[in-house]
Image (cartoon, coloured by chain):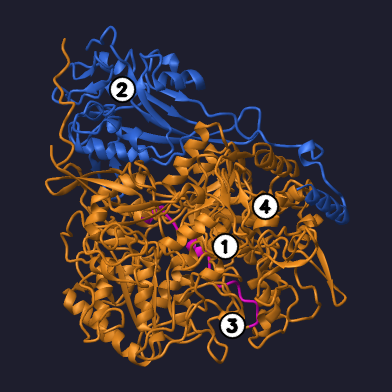
Chain colours: A orange, B blue
């Protein structure tokens, strides 16, 4: 019998269009195969710096996203009450004119009455530019409820953090330690890196209460108690310091460990660095014992120095740091029970870190020159690297925990060295290279500068002259002074409370605030629909832009429907959240590989139109004519500084990089190049970037900054000390009395662990269990539910219960549990999991859906059995009886403390559906088809 | 009853590394995307946005927890599963129409959809549950090892691998010829002790799995081991050590 005839070389597609994925935040390059003008298949782009050809489950399911029945179809104007989902379709002209008519009077009288917050926005340098020119101080993206602790602790400590700021040296690292990670930060690069590391026989240590995802393949899994990561890392530091297993040469050359701290008790300078007349921190030169500026050519800073002046002995940062971490409160034995990790294992892990960092050190044959003029013949490598994201960040002690982790890697000498953690251009960038926050608004006038920034001290706080918060989210106030990403999770609550003031219009983009992106979801729905004594909405107007029929759509008065990621222009800019690699600067675009088949527009083009209608500076010329036709026009022609625009590649005549004039053919050049641009870091500049003169010169050439600015890693964070000094009574700008002790306790310039604030404010006997969420690798926030393929992978989410609690409560498969926090209760299905911290329960994030949303049937498992933990988490801590509203956030940065949640669980009688149940929304887009048979041509 | 070839020239198949697979499902949807658009009938999804969505997939990932018998930490294993292209494939011999067949040249097991009557015997005969009947097309669907990619002249040479292999972010999936002892897959199996899935079934699967390496070995270390010997017990002693070490730098 002969085999059937088979065509093994069928035509794959008519054309391949290369663009950038947006199925999560990772921004991989994709090849979109087109047949008959339609999307037929999506695969990874092999040439792309982020994913090098691979693509995750989400990316490969993009075809189901661009065809999703939940796509909004036209601008919508609310006709029923808020929250009903009743709308009428209107024209773009009517929609934009309506928005203009609401916003124009605000801008001319009190621009702060617009609060414009964007969610999973990848165009923040543009949306912030719009908000700045509108003149409202109330702008931020979603970083405050995501990972601001990670970003901020990294910037303040070493000039960059993980993910977008840097990555392990995957080609050389031998030991990789990863703490609780949202698996889309970074999605593909971490998986690729783990594969590379494992293929070389390297080891992975995973620290996470839950053994899922990356922790499943970790050689060592540390199932830590939530919120105690900082304590665990402090114990590692304790052991390493005690054994002298730290890189003294690195610490003395590249960090502020040898800088001297002013010890003059009660002085307004106490705890600040001793500086020379030019403001440069001083060190003692070990060669001759003299005080010298830290960056003097040839100086050899002494870590062990102390200096007597006026009867006071000033010691180095290093000695203070050693005193802190050598303290017995951080011994493995002291932290073991609380962390849920044995003392022996803490020591074993510290020993392994030390062994690999010091016994497996190696050299690359690459000369380089440091900022003190010292020439180094080789680059010394220490093959230990770290990565962490939301798991350690989304706690109220997350900032200090993140700082502690950075201090650990700095003590080991593994940052910016071969085999360690490497920055991605335009990082590293010290605090001094970032703007400070700006908040001064005036009618009919742009804001006085960028909204977000890095405060250096009390003078930079966003306070009004009377000391009250200038921003609706109270970012950059004494409650959370270093809130570099704002506090999106407080906007609705504060706007509803009129605290610190009332606003008129809420304008959100891509943030599902009426569902999974808010704490206290039911409360937020009530706030959005609440009316005052006159029968008017307490929050008068809400404008929302989204591409899909999310839960938030129902709560807006005006919907501006966005295009999907294959139908729009976008710009992944170096001015924004770049996609660089450690060895290269890179940026990217999206372009419409298909045209929308609906009356929708890319949100950024809509903002440009609205900006022109409002005659905002930066959007109209001197005659009031629109400067840009659309976002594509802006991407090419906008210049932030002369010669520096949103895109760094193919500038000027097409050969200029970083700096250069406008090139009208720039987008064509990007498209020809696969929709991205890469400029490689010279070999001499590839490591030791903060101190490497070759790197500093290259960064200036590319326009990351205007002059070389080498700096020291900040083991000691002076900006925090300046806040403490104010709290101790120094200076003109003073915190309110009720916040003084909080600032002194939590803004310690050398990290000190404290218990998460919810834990400290609730009765832990009544709420003995920790409750967490994890993000599945195959879903991105709420987006996966509308995807016919992905929702079959994660269509509902049980509450996973560890063996000890499973037995204690006598659970069986198919049982339900009532889960109660100090704020609320839910009743949900349970499942057993053995690889889980014994005092922790968890579920997948954002699987649960409101009935009627996302074009799903009302009996969809997401809406019947799926649930959110959000109902158990409040944006405020339980009242303390002082009449004040205490935010459930990190007191340093305002990071939303999602993972501080404490609960108790009980077996519940079976119920039909997970509780609470909310009424169905009326879908503005109808329902999806019963059967999908995806095929463009047969 | 359909005959199997006595031998095949090549034995094409996959090696799946269970030590590296993070369970991300990238292979699942890349497979779905390629194969719904290409070989045979589309891979349909019924009740796609409803209460009981059920779709046809040629490759799925199952996740298991394994609690070691002698105690110790629970292990999580992500286990991707698709057709193993067995040498003694019972799904072929059971087929009443000859629709199910194993290719002589490379050993790939395929279904000729034109001849498939949708009787489902092959799925019943497969001990691995690797075949799925498409409910809307009424034909049996299974992994084709991307037979329309691996020889496809319209693809660049480096892309002539199954879609699941090309997309796997962790590099946990490898494609090659097991008949060649020097191939990448044969070497990986030799080096890492690759195993057959359920060898007792006697189907001689071509695909192999690399077992997870031993885990959680760093349970305890005596603080007095030389690596972590304290340099000083007192803060003053630490400073003296520091000074001495700095002198030596």
* Secondary structure category for the residue under label 3: helix
* Same chain for the residues under marks 1 and 2 in the image: no
The one nearer the camera, A236 or A229, is A236
Query: Mark number for residue A797?
Result: none
Mark in the foreground, 1 or 2: 1
Disc 2 target residue: B124
- Image position, residue A798 (x, y; %): 47, 49
The one nearer the camera, A455 or A292, is A292
* Same chain for the residues under marks 1 and 4 in the image: yes
Assess whether mark 3 and mark 2 are in contact (beta carbons under 8 angstroms): no
Query: Which residue: 59% across, 51% down?
Result: A415
Disc 4 target residue: A250
Quarter of the image that includes the N terminus of chain A: top left
Magenta residues, dominant SS class: loop
Disc 1 target residue: A710
Label 4 crowding class (10 Å Cα cut-off): few <14, some 14-19, many 20+? some
Is tag 1's residue or tag 4's residue first in the polypeptide sequence? 4
* Same chain for the residues under marks 4 and 3 in the image: yes
On whether residue A877 falls in the magenta region, the answer is yes
Mark in the foreground, 4 or 3: 4
* Secondary structure category for the residue under label 2: helix
Disc 3 target residue: A459
Name the chain under label 2: B
Say whether residue B196 is left or right of residue A734.
Answer: left
Assess whether mark 1 and mark 3 are in contact (beta carbons under 8 angstroms): no
Point out the stretch of residues depicted in magenta. A863-882
């Amino acid at each position: 019998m002969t085999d059937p005839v088979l065509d093994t070389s069928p035509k794959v597609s008519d054309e391949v269009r290369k663009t950038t994925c947006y199925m999560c935040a990772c921004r991989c390059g994709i090849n979109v195969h087109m047949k008959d003008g339609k999307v037929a298949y999506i695969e990874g782009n092999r040439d792309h710096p982020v994913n090098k050809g691979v693509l995750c489950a989400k990316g490969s399911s993009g075809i189901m996203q661009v065809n999703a029945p939940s796509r909004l179809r036209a601008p919508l104007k609310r006709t029923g009450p808020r929250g009903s989902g009743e709308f009428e379709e209107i024209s773009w002209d009517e929609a934009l004119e309506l928005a203009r008519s609401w916003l124009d009077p605000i801008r001319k009288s009190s621009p702060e009455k617009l609060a414009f917050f964007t969610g999973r926005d990848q165009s923040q340098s543009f949306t912030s530019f719009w908000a700045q020119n509108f003149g409202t101080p109330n702008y931020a993206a979603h970083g405050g409820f995501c990972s601001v602790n990670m970003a901020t602790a990294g910037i303040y400590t070493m000039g960059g953090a993980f993910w977008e700021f840097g990555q392990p040296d995957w080609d050389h690292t031998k030991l990789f330690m990863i703490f609780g990670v949202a698996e889309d930060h970074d999605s593909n690069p971490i998986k690729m890196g783990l594969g590379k590391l494992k293929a070389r026989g390297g080891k992975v240590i995973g620290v996470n209460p839950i053994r899922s995802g990356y922790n499943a393949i970790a050689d060592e899994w540390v199932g830590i108690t939530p919120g105690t990561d900082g304590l665990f890392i402090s114990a590692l530091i304790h052991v390493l310091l005690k054994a002298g297993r730290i890189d003294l040469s690195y610490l003395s050359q590249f960090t502020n460990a040898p800088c001297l701290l002013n010890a003059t008790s009660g002085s307004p300078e106490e705890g600040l660095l001793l500086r020379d007349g030019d403001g440069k921190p001083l060190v003692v030169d070990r060669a001759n014992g003299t005080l010298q500026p830290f960056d003097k050519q040839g100086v050899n800073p002494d870590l062990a120095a102390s200096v007597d002046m006026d009867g006071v002995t000033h010691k180095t940062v290093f000695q203070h740091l050693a005193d802190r971490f050598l303290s017995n409160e951080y011994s493995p034995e002291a932290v073991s029970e609380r962390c849920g990790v044995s003392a022996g294992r803490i020591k074993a892990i510290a020993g392994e870190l030390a062994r690999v960092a010091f016994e497996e050190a190696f050299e690359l044959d690459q000369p380089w020159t440091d900022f003190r003029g010292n020439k180094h013949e080789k680059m010394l490598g220490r093959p230990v690297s770290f990565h962490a994201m939301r798991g350690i960040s989304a706690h109220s002690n997350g900032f200090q925990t993140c700082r502690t982790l950075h201090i650990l890697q700095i003590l080991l000498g593994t940052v910016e060295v071969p085999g360690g953690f490497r920055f991605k251009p335009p990082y590293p960038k010290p605090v001094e290279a970032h703007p400070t926050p700006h908040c001064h608004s005036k009618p009919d006038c742009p804001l006085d500068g960028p909204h977000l920034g890095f405060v250096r001290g009390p003078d930079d706080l966003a306070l009004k002259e009377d000391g009250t918060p200038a921003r609706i989210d109270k970012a950059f106030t004494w409650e959370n002074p270093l809130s570099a990403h704002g506090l999106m999770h407080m906007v609705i609550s504060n706007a509803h409370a009129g605290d610190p003031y009332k606003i008129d219009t809420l304008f959100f983009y891509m943030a599902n605030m009426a569902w999974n992106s808010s704490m206290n979801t039911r409360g937020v729905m009530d706030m959005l629909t609440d009316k005052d004594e006159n029968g008017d909405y307490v929050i008068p107007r809400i404008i929302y832009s989204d591409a899909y029929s999310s839960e938030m759509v129902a709560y807006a008065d005006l919907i501006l429907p966005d295009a999907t990621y294959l139908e729009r222009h976008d710009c992944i800019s170096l001015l924004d959240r770049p996609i660089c690699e450690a060895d290269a600067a890179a940026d990217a675009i999206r372009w419409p590989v298909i045209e929308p088949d609906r009356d929708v527009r890319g949100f950024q083009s809509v903002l440009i139109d609205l900006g022109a209608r409002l005659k905002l500076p930066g959007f109209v010329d001197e005659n009031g004519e629109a400067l840009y036709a659309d976002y594509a026009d802006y991407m090419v022609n906008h210049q932030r500084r002369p010669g520096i625009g949103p895109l760094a590649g193919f500038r000027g005549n097409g050969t200029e990089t970083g700096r250069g004039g406008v090139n009208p053919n720039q987008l064509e050049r990007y498209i020809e190049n696969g929709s991205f641009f890469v400029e490689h870091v010279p070999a001499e500049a590839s490591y030791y970037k903060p101190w490497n003169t070759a790197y500093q010169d290259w960064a200036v050439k590319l326009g990351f900054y205007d002059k070389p600015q080498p700096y020291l890693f900040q083991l000691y964070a002076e900006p925090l000390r300046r806040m403490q000094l104010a709290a101790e009574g120094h200076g003109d700008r003073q915190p309110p009395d009720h916040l003084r002790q909080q600032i002194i306790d939590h803004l310690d310039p050398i990290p000190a662990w404290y218990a998460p604030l919810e834990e400290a404010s609730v009765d832990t006997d009544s709420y003995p269990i920790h409750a967490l969420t994890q993000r599945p690798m195959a879903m991105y926030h709420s987006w996966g539910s509308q995807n016919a393929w992905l929702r079959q992978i994660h269509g509902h989410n049980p509450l996973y219960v560890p063996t000890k609690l499973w037995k204690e409560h006598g659970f069986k498969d198919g049982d339900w549990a009532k889960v109660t926090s100090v704020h609320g209760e839910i009743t949900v299905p349970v499942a057993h999991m053995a690889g889980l911290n014994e005092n922790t329960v968890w579920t997948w994030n954002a699987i649960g859906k409101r009935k009627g949303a996302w074009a799903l049937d009302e009996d969809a498992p997401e809406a019947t059995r799926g649930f959110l933990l959000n109902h158990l988490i409040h944006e405020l801590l339980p009242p303390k009886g002082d009449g004040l509203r205490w935010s459930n956030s990190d007191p340093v940065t305002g990071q939303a403390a999602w993972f501080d949640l404490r609960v108790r669980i009980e077996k519940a009688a079976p119920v039909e559906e997970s509780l609470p149940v909310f009424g169905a929304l009326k879908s503005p887009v109808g329902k999806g088809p019963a059967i999908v048979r995806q095929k463009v041509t047969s | 009853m359909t005959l199997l070839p006595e031998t095949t020239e090549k034995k094409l198949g996959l090696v799946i590394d269970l030590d590296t697979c993070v369970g991300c499902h990238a292979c699942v949807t890349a497979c779905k995307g390629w194969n719904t658009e290409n070989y045979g009938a589309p891979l349909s999804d019924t009740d796609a946005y409803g209460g009981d969505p059920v779709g046809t997939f040629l490759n799925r990932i199952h996740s298991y927890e394994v609690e070691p018998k002698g105690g110790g930490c629970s292990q999580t294993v992500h286990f991707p599963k698709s057709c193993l292209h067995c040498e003694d494939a019972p799904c072929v011999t059971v087929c009443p129409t000859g629709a199910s067949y194993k290719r002589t040249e490379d050993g790939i097991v395929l279904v000729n959809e034109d001849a498939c009557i949708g009787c489902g015997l092959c799925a019943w005969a497969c001990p691995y549950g690797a075949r799925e009947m498409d409910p809307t097309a009424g034909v049996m669907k299974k992994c084709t090892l991307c037979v329309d990619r691996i020889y496809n002249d319209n693809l660049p040479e480096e892309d002539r691998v199954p879609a699941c292999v090309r997309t796997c972010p962790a590099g946990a999936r490898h494609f090659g010829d097991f008949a060649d002892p020097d191939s990448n897959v044969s070497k990986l199996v030799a080096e890492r002790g690759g195993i057959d899935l359920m060898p007792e079934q006697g189907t001689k699967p071509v695909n192999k799995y690399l077992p997870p390496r031993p885990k959680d070995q760093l349970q305890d270390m005596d603080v007095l081991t030389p690596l972590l010997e304290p340099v000083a017990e007192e803060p003053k002693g630490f400073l003296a050590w520091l000074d001495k070490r700095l002198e030596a730098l």
